[in-house]
Image: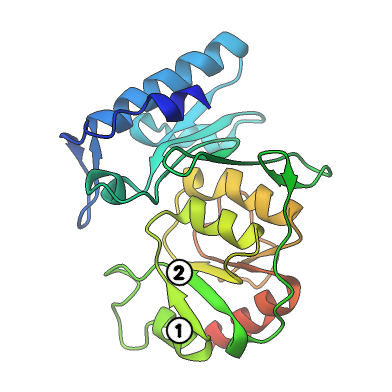
Amino acid sequence: MSVGNAIVATDVGVVTRKRGRANFATAADHAAEKAIIAALAAHDASIPVLAEESATRALQRAERLWVVDPIDGTLNFSRGIAFYAVVAAAVHSPRTRETFVASEGAGARRGRERIHVSATARLSQALATASLGYRAMRGQQPKMPRLAAACAGMRDVGSAALGICYVADGRFDLFAHQFLWPWDIAAPSLIAREAGARVVSLKTGADARWDERQVVIGNPALARAAFALLDR
């Protein structure tokens, strides 16, 4: 993916700051978003683009749209940590040179290789990835520590999109998050589903919408077990 490969790893100057801790965009975020939007417009200018750094929320109701996250994991990127990705109907990891793609009904792939979720059936044997940021840890009974206590291990890789793709690829068994944005979930949730995962809304227990903010993702057995645990 040429846009991902063109990201300048040292272009980490903060351009915009957003609400919340360590929530900002670098010059590289804006440059990548501009390049992606230009590439998509050249392909088909009639399809609107919902992109993180220039988001128009009303576009979520569009019949067709591209959903773009120029760099998912900006804090990691700004510190030289390899776990960040470019998200635009596929998920590309520039540092590891891996691209995860899927299309509805055709399965999911890492490059040319088919991928599938793990067969781990018990939470006690599962390696999970989840958001362990300050918002997830607030409140009287935060959910993520409860999930961590039930699993064999838990990691926060700092990029929701890569975390979901790693579940699709069987590296992690389970993903959980309570504060996603549409550009975090749209592409990787399709990849996960096509790899055999269930993407479950933590609000309803039903299959999550494409822009759901609170989800648990894993093979059907683990997704059910994790939802039952977190729904208490």
Residue 197 drawn above or below residue 59:
below
Determine which quarter of the picture holds residue 20. Answer: bottom left
Residue 127 drawn above or below residue 194:
below
Closer to the camera in the image, 205 or 109 = 109
Which amino acid type corresponds to the residue marked 2 in the rendered image? Ala
Color encoding of the figure: rainbow
- Residue 98 lies, in percent from the top left, at 55, 42
Which amino acid type corresponds to the residue marked 1 in the rendered image? Ala
Asked which secondary structure carries label 1, the reply is helix
- Residue 204 lies, in percent from the top left, at 62, 71
Query: Dot 2, crowdedness within 10 Å: few (<14), some or many (≥20)?
Result: many
* Circle number at residue 19: none
Instruction: Please state if 116 lies on the left or on the right of 12 as rendered.
Output: right
- Mark 1 and mark 2 in contact? Answer it, CB < 8 Å: yes
* Circle number at residue 130: 2
Question: Who's the residue at 65% across and 58% down the image?
Answer: 168
Sequence-first disc among 1 and 2:
2
Residue 209 drawn above or below residue 51:
below
Q: Mark 1 points at which residue?
A: 148
Question: Who's the residue at 38% across and 20% down the image?
Answer: 34
| Disc 1/disc 2 C-alpha distance (Å) | 9 Å
Report the label total. Answer: 2
Asked which secondary structure carries label 2, the reply is strand
**Residue extending furthest toward the right:** 105
Residue 45 is at least partly visible in this image: no
